[in-house]
Amino acid sequence: MGNHKSDQKRTSCVSQNEKAKSKLVSQVVRIVRKAGLDYEDWRYVSRRVREQCELKPKKKGRKLPRVLTAEEFRHFYQIVDRAEDIQHALMLRLLFYTGVRVSELCGIKVSDVDLENCKIFVEQGKGSKDRYVLFGKTFATALKTHIANRPTNRWLFQTKRASKFSTRRVQQIVKQYAEEAGVKATPHTFRHQAITWLTKHSGLADAELQLITGHARRETLSIYQHVALDKQLEEKYQQTMRQVDL
């Protein structure tokens, strides 16, 4: 009899705990949606919350990032081109060429683009860090035409209402083309794709890759904090990206 009551009490406590957690999840979802956080923003916020609350996650195996096969990659961009939306085609190619996060892509202003040197200034990227990212010389002509055809634009990729694209809208655009192409992809897939390609083909050192992708961890900052974005690094990048048929 005593054991039965004890079991009921434990079940009741578990039920109340689950309800409390469910309610908390709903509250957090509303906050995240209202703030318009994307995947990277949410990762940053959740990490800071864990740090301030001194919450330690259980150790688990590290998952490898999923990238598209060469055939899936080509087919995705074929589907994009078939839609004949120039802005979408440029936007989704820039995701790959630069390896920027979706929030960083949306925040690129026309004034941030250096067509002559094939660089884009990313202001206050993840971790509130400024950096430059590169794009291929063969892509510069298309980007130059895009900018010239929109002389009054403030944002590199701008909606009809003269505002920048939201991260959610870019996610929807990628999802739409991915479904048509029969592949699984998000904007972040192309960041993984770019870093994987550069790692495999460029000959860039880890410190150089971290510099141009902004893919840094606190414990590795000391390795590359004095590395400059020099001409040799840029040439390695350009040689590698010339091999990509987009």
Image (spheres, helix red, strand yellow):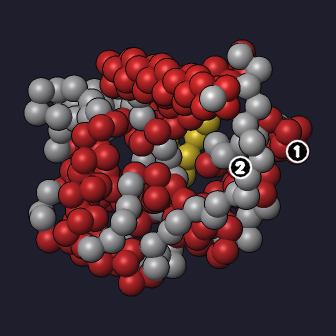
The x, y position of residue 68, in whole percent, is 45, 72
Reading the image, the residue beneath label 2 is 210
Work out whether residue 48 or residue 133 is closer to the camera in this orientation and state it.
48
Looking at the image, is 79 positioned above or below residue 225?
A: below
Instruction: Note whether residue 149 is visible.
Output: yes
Q: Residue at x 62, y 49 (%)?
A: 213
Q: Quadrant of residue 6?
A: top right
Sooner in the amino-acid sequence: mark 2 or mark 1: 2
Element carrying mark 1: helix
Viewer-closest of 39 and 8: 8
Q: Residue furthest bottom?
A: 71
Q: Where residue 23 sits in the image (x, y, percent)? A: 41, 20
In the figure, 80 relative to 43: above or below? below
Helix, strand, or loop for circle 2?
Answer: helix
Residue type beneath disc 2: Gln
Quadrant containing the N terminus is top right
Which residue is denoted by mark 1 in the rendering?
Answer: 223
Give the class, few, some or many, for how many residues have Cα within 10 Å of label 1's Cα (few <14, many ≥20).
few
